[in-house]
Image (cartoon, rainbow, N blue to C red):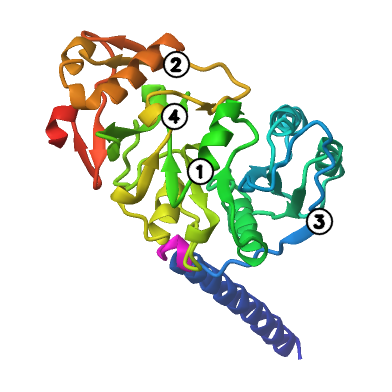
Amino acid sequence: MRYWKVFKNIFVMGFIVSVMWLMFSWSSMEFIRYASMDPRSIPITVKNKLCHVNNIDERVFVNNSSDLKMIYYVTPTYPRPEQVPELTRLAHTLMHVPKIHWIVADDQSLCSKDVADILRRTGLPYTHISSPKPYIYKGTNFPRGVANRRAALSWLQENADDGVLYFGDDDNTIDLQLFGEIRLTKKVSMFPVGLIGDYGVSSPVVKDGKVVGFFDSWPGSRMFAVDMAGFAVNIEFLKPSANMPYIAGHEEDRFLVSLGLKLEDIEPLAANCSKVLVWHTKTVKYKKPTLRVDIKKLEDVTAYKYFVNLLKETSRLGMASISNINGTKPYITRNRKSYETVADLH
């Protein structure tokens, strides 16, 4: 009897260990399988919640002419100490803009009272969405904002037939002039964004009124090397295929590619991309970069005078220093290729 009990205990322990080993092996294989997959193909379940929609413009000090196109200003946000002050600052800019609908998609599973109070006090038409990021990304900050923008895109495709879409983060600073310009977008318009990367600015390069390349410190084999705040899209050009993948650093590019956008479709704004009307400001100190550029030599290439003016503007506003001796050597990208000078684009 004693040996039978020992045998029984050994059998039970062996069975338990075998089950634990099988469970560990299965979970490990699943992890490896997902890790090796394209992030866009990983089964992702996100439960969005429509918190509130207000279509009534309660502002009495703004002239909302019916002739103006509606701007749908999409802001992804997430809970942090700076969330309320940054949304408050942005709200006081948007309150001066006529014919605008603010879509705020919040990265949390509940409808935040703080966010709702800010939206309500603006008097703006708005949509408040609870759009938490997928669980597989909970342990990291990347790709931040994608779930929020995807939720806003879904709402727009169901509720908006015309107007202009613009993605504006809660820590961006926008010149009011930009709203008047993007409102005229026919397909996709683009313009410079200040305080970006190692060049101090991210911008399309314009020649004879057409976009011929991109000036951005992280080309990343992107067809459209632009910042999220550097373009606007006409809602009529927002095709059902429009999608933004969970691939950090490629959100803008893949979204624009999903629209079927071509280089010749792009409408350059902000004085042919020579002026900065939006900045990617943050609540941290900005380290000003130095660009190694022979500005005098560039001035001889008259076809790119707007790009030269942008570099001068970038220096004048203190976003980057320009030196013909020291600093980072910048490149221009076109069709996923990098070029040292604008002359190489000919």
Could you tell me if residue 119 is visible in this image?
Answer: yes
Q: Which residue is mark 4?
A: 270
The stretch drawn in magenta includes residue 250:
no
Q: Which residue is mark 1?
A: 184
What amino acid is found at the position of numbered circle 3 in the picture? Cys
Query: 47 left or right of 181?
Result: right
Q: Which residue is mark 3?
A: 51
Sequence-first tag of 2 and 3: 3
Q: Position of residue 334 (x, y in %)?
A: 24, 42
What amino acid is found at the position of numbered circle 2 in the picture? Met
Sequence-first tag of 4 and 1: 1
What amino acid is found at the position of numbered circle 4 in the picture? Ala
The Cα atoms of the two marked residues, 4 and 3, are separated by: 35 Å
Number of numbered labels in the structure image:
4
Q: Main secondary structure of the magenta part?
A: helix
Query: 204 left or right of 133?
Result: left
The Cα atoms of the two marked residues, 4 and 1, are separated by: 12 Å
The Cα atoms of the two marked residues, 4 and 2, are separated by: 17 Å
Mark 1: few/some/many CA within 10 Å (<14, 14-19, 20+): some
Sequence-first tag of 4 and 2: 4
